[in-house]
Amino acid sequence: MPAQSFGRRTFLAGSAGALALSLAACAGSGATAKRTAEKKPVYAQPEGDVPAEYAKRQRVVAWTTWGSTTGAVVAELAKRFNESQSDIFLDLQSQNGTYDELAQKLAAGLQAKQIPDLAIFSEVTWHKFFLNDTLEPLDDYFTKSAPRAAYNSRLLDEGVLSGQLWWVPFARSTPLFYYNRDLFAQAGLPDRAPKTWSEMREWGAELKGITYNGNQPKMFAYPQVDGDWMFQGVLWNFGGGISKGLDITIDDAASIAAGEYERKLVADKLAYMATAPLTDFENGLIAAAEDSTGALGSVVQNSKFEVGTGFVPGEKSQEVPTGGGGFSIMANSSTSRKKAAFEFLSFLAKPEQAAYWTTSTGYMPVVDAAKKESSFVDLVKKNPNFEVAIKQMDKTKKEDDVRLFVPNANIALYEGLQQIWSKNASAKSVFADVAETLKRSEAQIRAAYESRVK
């Protein structure tokens, strides 16, 4: 089954504001308090049908985002789990939307005191629910038969805050550099990804005047929405960043240099802002693109040329952000439902199930032993590009805290980038405005952050 193409989630300003307000409302005074040992009230589960053959089992409700191909893979995993034991019924309820839309529904459910026991969160959304004290710490659930060590330690550690684990990796990804091998050969470029962004700029100049399938392709394109995820890595590459803790650094000299690099690439007509850069790449309108590793299968399938992949270019350094989703258990579920929910997570961490998920979707293997499963080994042999994504894991880094914790930070960032890419606005002036917006927003959550994040 080929991987499905996943763009970064689209999160409109209005819905983001609604989510922030909903979370604040459901948190109450607990938003700024440390987690206590007090027993939380138990909320009801969302309604759902339980098949007759599972009627006497403990029902666990899990909310996910996926439909279509990926939804079918998750549904198969739920079916396998239900058939593997006789005590728990996993009621998988897809919300068929984005991570952020699921988070909105979950915030509303918390207010209504009706929640799933288990939910999928993006690397951004789980941090908001952590601050509002609505997630269950997971450390004590691990056992010898369900060991913590099964997970890739780098990915698992991204779910740790204040010395406890809150978020277990599942649908994880990183950006990957895709290039058109045929077009590179026609332009006389090396058959590899550029090592630095400066080298990519030099290669872009070699494309001027070249005609490919009736088009005059440019080197690169930037996504109109959600480009802030990939720009996080570019900031690091140039020595900058969004923030250090909650202290804003997007307007420092190194960060401005990263923005100016991209502005000049567009101004010199080597790149442009696109609604869907991967589609333009597949159609031969650009020579290279940066997108999620989870898109690899569909890119290869949809392109009429040989697709090459490589590490995302560096500059002063070479680092890439991680992204994608993981599971958390809700703190207001009952004790028995929480234990049962973790049983499903343990099932997903079994090497054969983790390998099935990875080979069926294209997401990163979050369980190290999955890479030894025959299905995974066969995938890498058949598609060596996939191994590039695995090797790049050593270059990954957790995103800056402002993007992870501050409501609407992603919107402020990608809307600023839109000004740079489409209006030739200077990075210095744009990032000064973005910094002011982020400072106002981070002030709203600083007390909770300083109380709970260590």
Image (cartoon, rainbow, N blue to C red):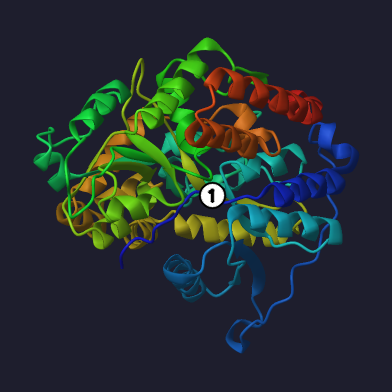
Please give left or right for residue 60 compared with residue 76 in the image. Answer: right
User: Residue 333 appears at what percent x and percent y?
Assistant: 75, 58
Please give left or right for residue 213 compared with residue 138 in the image. Answer: left
Q: Disc 1 designates what residue? A: 326
User: Residue 206 appears at what percent x and percent y?
Assistant: 18, 31
User: Residue 377 appears at what percent x and percent y?
Assistant: 20, 53
Q: Is residue 176 at all visible to an observer of this figure?
A: yes
Give amino acid for label 1.
Gly
Q: Residue at x 65, y 81 (%)?
A: 50
Please give left or right for residue 382 compared with residue 298 in the image. Answer: left
Q: Residue furthest front?
A: 209
Q: Residue furthest top?
A: 253
Q: Is residue 244 at all visible to an observer of this figure?
A: no
Q: Residue at x 71, y 22 (%)?
A: 436
Q: Residue at x 73, y 23 (%)?
A: 439
Give residue 351's quadrant in the image. bottom left
- In this rendering, is residue 168 above or below 235? below
